[in-house]
Image (cartoon, rainbow, N blue to C red):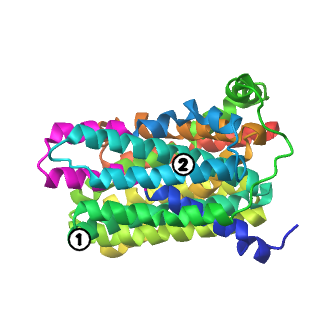
Amino acid sequence: MPSLKESIFSRRMAVAFCMGFSCGVPLLLTLSVLQAWMKEKGVDLGVIGLFSLAGLPYTLKFLWAPVLDRFTPGFMGRRRGWLLIIQVCLMAAIAGLGLSDPGRNPWMVAFAAMLVTFFSASQDIVVDAYRREDLSDRELGLGSSLYVNGYRVGMLLAGSGGLILADYIPFSMVYLIMAASLGVGVVTTLLAREPEIAEGTPVTFREAVLEPFLEYFSRSGAVPILAFILLYKIGDQMATTMTMPFYLDLGFTKTEIGAIAKLFGFWATIAGGLAGGVMMLRLGIHRSLYIFGFLQAISTTGFAVLSQMGHSIAALAAVIAGENFSGGMGTAAYVAFMASITNKKFTATQYALLSSLMGIPRVLASAPTGYIAEFTGWTLFFLLCAAAAVPGLVLLRFIRRYE
């Protein structure tokens, strides 16, 4: 077994980070960056809103994940071969999106954006599978945290970096630069090793499509584990949905929010992810989920305290640091747990399904949060968000017996 130092500074961890970066870059290119470009070109707000549908492939990716489990390209192996094909197509799609014209032909832009999200979601499928198969169970926690942090760095480059660049150069050039930045993923794929899978691979479509689901639901505790996945981050997600109007209600300026909540908070999240990954090497995934989940709940109560204190830069910084640091730890453990429960024979399909389920509470539980906050007031609202973490922690204790 490799030492702690050998695990942290291994090739596998560098691959996890770089692949995370490659997965993070495309996301905002079809969201905030594209919205800014369309607004600049005078596209109708209703049409801009409809472009959120371009993100559907991220939710539906489990539908074609079996194809990536079933078939192996004729070069570089099942995971690296698919990755190289998808990454080249993704770079071409992003470049094509940049060469389109939102003002003259928004529906052609919509088609290009859908291609970007399809290939981006496909890259996510294969990278998630690769990480599960390349890392040992002990290394999954740290590898997942580095992947998540790489993802966030990629989002920062595309989101903040892309918008800043757009003040100086045309959006078309911004998209070409972002397409070129995915060369990091291509180089990583070429230099990485193909994982060896002792469990074998699906040899028929029935194996690839049906058996991942049959295998999972044949396990004891399959339903409670799914319930845990749905509930573990629900309180944190509910609170995050309402933080922006909360800050503004307390009288914080946009500059203060941008500097502290966004920039300072970003680095606190990165630090939390790294700390959580290292701690998981020592504690294991289950103990980490308990500890990090408890810290997430405690940090959410910090918003309730802030609501009583009012406008205080120092208090805002402390609350943001605590919430983002614990959130980074919790996300790393959460992602590692989902990877750990997949069968390596069907990694792509099972992980794609589980990661799609992750998005359900973010949408359904977050939708009524504005009405809840209006009815209860900010203090009680954030206390309720903290309490929403309890069912997930209770389920974690319950499902431990099935591991």
Instruction: Check disc 2 and report the residue beneath it.
Output: 86
Residue drawn where x is 40% and y is 49% of the image:
93
Q: Secondary structure at mark 2?
A: helix
Provide residue 243's location: percent of width, then percent of height. 34, 54
Question: Visible in this render: residue 126?
Answer: yes
Q: Nearer the viewer, residue 153 or 177?
A: 177
Work out whether 289 lies above or below 258.
Answer: above
**Can you tell which quarter of the image residue 18 is in?**
bottom right
Provide residue 329's location: percent of width, then percent of height. 59, 61
Work out whether 325 lies above or below 134.
Answer: below
Question: Which label's residue is closer to the chain start, 2 or 1?
Answer: 2
Provide residue 106's location: percent of width, then percent of height. 21, 41
Instruction: Check disc 1 and report the residue beneath it.
Output: 255
Magenta span covers which residues?
Answer: 26-54
Q: Is residue 51 magenta?
A: yes
Check disc 2: other Cα within 10 Å, few if <14, some if 14-19, many if 20+. Answer: many
Question: Visible in this render: residue 286?
Answer: no
Furthest-left residue in this view: 42
Q: Main secondary structure of the magenta part?
A: helix
Q: Nearer the viewer, residue 401 or 82?
A: 82
Q: Quarter holding the N terminus? A: bottom right
